[in-house]
Each structure stands twice: as C-alpha cells, then as structure tokens.
Image (spheres, grey):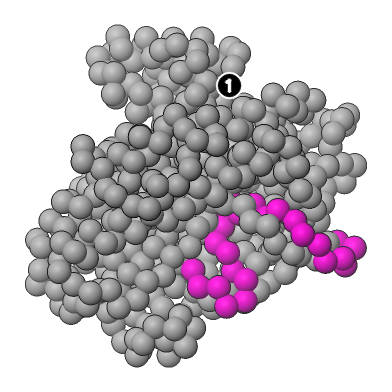
Amino acid sequence: MKARQLIQLGIPNGPAIQIARKALRCAAAAGLGKADRRRRLMEVIEDPAACLTDLCFGALARALSEEVRGGPLPPAAGVARSEPAPWRQWGDDLEPQSIQQMVNACSLPIAVRGALMPDAHLGYGLPIGGVLATDNAVIPYAVGVDIACRMKMTVLDLPVNAIAGQTDRLVHAINRETEFGIGAEFSRPHDHEVMDEDWSFSPVTDRFKDKAHRQLGTSGSGNHFVEFGILDTGSDFAEATGFDLPPGQYLALLTHSGSRGTGALVAGHYSRLAAAMRPELVRPLRHLAWLDLDTEAGQEYWHAMQLMGRYAQANHAIIHRMIARHLKVNVLADIENHHNFAWKETHTTPTGEKRKVIVHRKGATPAAAGDIGIIPGSMASPAYVVRGRGSEESLNSASHGAGRVMSRSQAKRTYTWSAARKYLDEKGVKLICAGLDEVPWVYKDIDKVMADQQDLVEVLARFDPKIVKMSPGGRAED
C-alpha cells in the first residue's frame, strides 16, 4: 500500500508509515486476504489500544498509541496556557488517560471551557465523551473520526407482540434493507436530496461523492447497530416530544450510525491539514490541532462537517424508511440526535461573559433545556429517551452511551460466544450477528451512567432491545 493511501486512512506521516507496511506484509504472509488486511488496519487506526498484542499489527498499535495517549504537558509546551481552562467531570470512575486528555484539551490557547461525561474513555486528542468550547476555531479530531455519528428511533405501527410472533419477518427486514461492515455499499444506490447538494467545495467530498452515494443507507461496523425493541413511555413523553403517544409500550426501531467512509476521509484530511498548520504543537496536543474559522481551510472543513451531518441524517432516514416500507407500517414517532459534531452556541465564559463559542461534542449528546435525545446502553441493556435540563456547567451536554470498560482485543481474549449467547437468551435478546468485542460486558452499567448525570437529563422513556444486528466484526468509524 502506498504512503499516500496510508496517510489518507489516518496513519501519520513518518516512521509509522514503514511500520504499517511491515504489518501489512506480515498479515499477508499469515494468509489474510486484501480485504481482511485493510479491515484489520482500520481497526488498529481507530482503536490502537485494543490491538497492542496483535502478532502483526502490535508494533503499529504501539506507535499509534503513543500518538493518541500523549500525557501531561511538558513545562515548556509553548502554545499551551499556563493553566487549563475550567472544566468539570461527571462520574467518579473515569480512566486517568481520558481525564489527562481533557486537561490537555483545556490547555489549548483557544479553549474556553470543557466538560467530561460519565461514559468518557480514551480517544484521539479529545476523549470520547469530551465536550470542549473554543474561541472561533474548530478541531477536526474533537468532532471525531465519524462525523455526525448519531442515533435515530422510530415508533412503528406494529403490536409489541410482533417481537415474538413475527421475529423472522423483522429479522428479514433488517437483513434486506441495510448493509453492515467497513466498505459496505449498495450496487443500486438510494436516492436522497442530500446527493443533489453541492459536494464540490472540498477536494474530499468532491472526490468521494460517488462512494458516499453507494454507502447511503448502510450501517457501518463495530458499535453501530440496528435494533427492534420495546419502548416504554412515561407520562411526560407526549408533552415533551409532541407525539400523541399515551404512556405504554410500543414497538420501535433504533439505529446507530454516522457518515460512513466519506466522513472518516473528511476527518482525516482536515486533521492532517490542521496538524500541518500547527507544527509548534507538542505531542500531547498534536491531535488537537485546530483550524481558525476565519480562514479558508476552517470554512471548508466547517461546510464539509455540516454536509456530513446532513448525509448522516439521510443515512438513517433511508434505513428507517426502507424498513418501514418493507414491513408496510406507518411511523408514529421519530426522534434523532447527533453526538459527534461541533455547534456555534452562546455560553457563559469563566468571567461571567456570555459569548459565542464553538462547542465540540465528541461522543456527547446535546442536552439544552428541552432537547430530546437518545442514550443507548448495550445489545442487552436499555437505551433511554431523555430531555435535556440545560446545564451550563456541562455546556448543555450529556453522555452518548454507556462507554466502554474494556478494549476490543481484551474482550476477544476474555469472553466466548457460548457465554454471550446464554446471557442474551436470558435477557430475551435475539442477536443476528455482532463482533465478540461488542458483547454486553464490555460496556459500563448504563443505569449507573444515567444516575451520574441526573442533573443533565431527565428520562422520558426506556427502550429494551430485542432483535439486534451489528457487523460480524470490525471497528466503527467513530
């Protein structure tokens, strides 16, 4: 694989390129086909900490982990503030590395305020579950690799007992109407007005528009999913959401996906561009390189991010539309939200001044007063429909899920499918397919996470997954 191709995938230019090439040669000698080598390479790029013991890719994972992990800032960090901008965390059991990443992010000269959600864990630059307000600047890696990764739920006009009585029909609808996995696409692309927009303003969106079109309506890999389940609504649900659904149980469809391969390419391109424009950044800050919004590069990324947001929304819309059409049912309610994005908002600065800032929510749910969002657990634990309380301390944010407690490689070494299947049977969950690194035990207790953020959101409804499909293996783009 050429250096240019490796850089486009997210390998930093330098020694890591040769390490990656050596890993690919090792994998080829071990009998892995081209597609499997690429898939494994993407897993290492997206989650190096999970691949440290891999026979062929371990050296690359260790090299990338040094890039990601960083550490405390050295005394003469140059561009860093003398003291970090104020920030607050929710939850008392967060890993030290994610906390240090939050401190590093708040040490940027553009940082205004920060917050760390109770599902936080290690990420590129900003931790997943990190929220950062900046002054007129956007950080591509603080938005995330999977731009506009999001949740969507539709309540369907089907009886709840269809979960048990029409299982095969529901499974067939998922299998027929979406595709899973890295690179998954349709030979006959779906139509959507987002593809009629101008994609030519950025070299990345211009070049990969056709790829994006073919992937429209696909579900990705890793922790992305499509689920049928039972939604139990509370007394405030109808008033809060505007949908005429009295308290009770309903059959619902829940999806988690993002902007697919094109979104990852946008993230990689502009992250490298930002890093090239900030050569003065020391290693702990390297993945926090920013683009000023009054520059051409900053505006180009901002518009590309917005387009990827509309594309991700269209991606979910097609999945839900096609499944509802397949089942010949009506949609009674529709709820959705981003959780990898940046917004222009007005917030209070540490000095008490209200001003416009750029709020990055990397794996965090918007939770301004009245905002409706979805916070999932795992394939065997509930998701919650919530209403934001508008906490200024959290920059109007909440967690985006339960948060991992175990790396993917450790999960594969620790658990077996026989134990997982037994547990899922006990929970009444039919799993179509997933990777072993997504079994329920790799996630925090979602109810503990929700308890840690009672001041950020209130629960309106509970969704219990009953039929679940994920990619058979691989890594999500977020």
Q: Position of residue 431 (x, y in %)?
A: 21, 55
Task: Identify the residue at horizontal 34%, vertical 86% (top origin).
Answer: 245
Q: Relative to residue 433, is residue 321 depicted above or below? A: below
For the N terminus, the image quarter is: top left
Task: Identify the residue at horizontal 29%, vertical 66% (top origin).
Answer: 253
Q: Position of residue 161 (x, y in %)?
A: 15, 77
Is 217 one of the magenta-colored residues? no
Q: Relative to residue 225, is residue 412 depicted above or below? A: above
Q: Position of residue 396 (x, y in %)?
A: 65, 67
Name the secondary structure under disc 1: loop
Q: Residues within 10 Å of mark 1 (few under 14, many from 20)?
A: some
Can see residue 102? yes
Q: How many marks?
A: 1
Res. 209 image quadrant: top left
Q: Is residue 358 left or right of residue 175?
A: right
Q: Is residue 212 left or right of residue 138?
A: left
Res. 72 image quadrant: top right
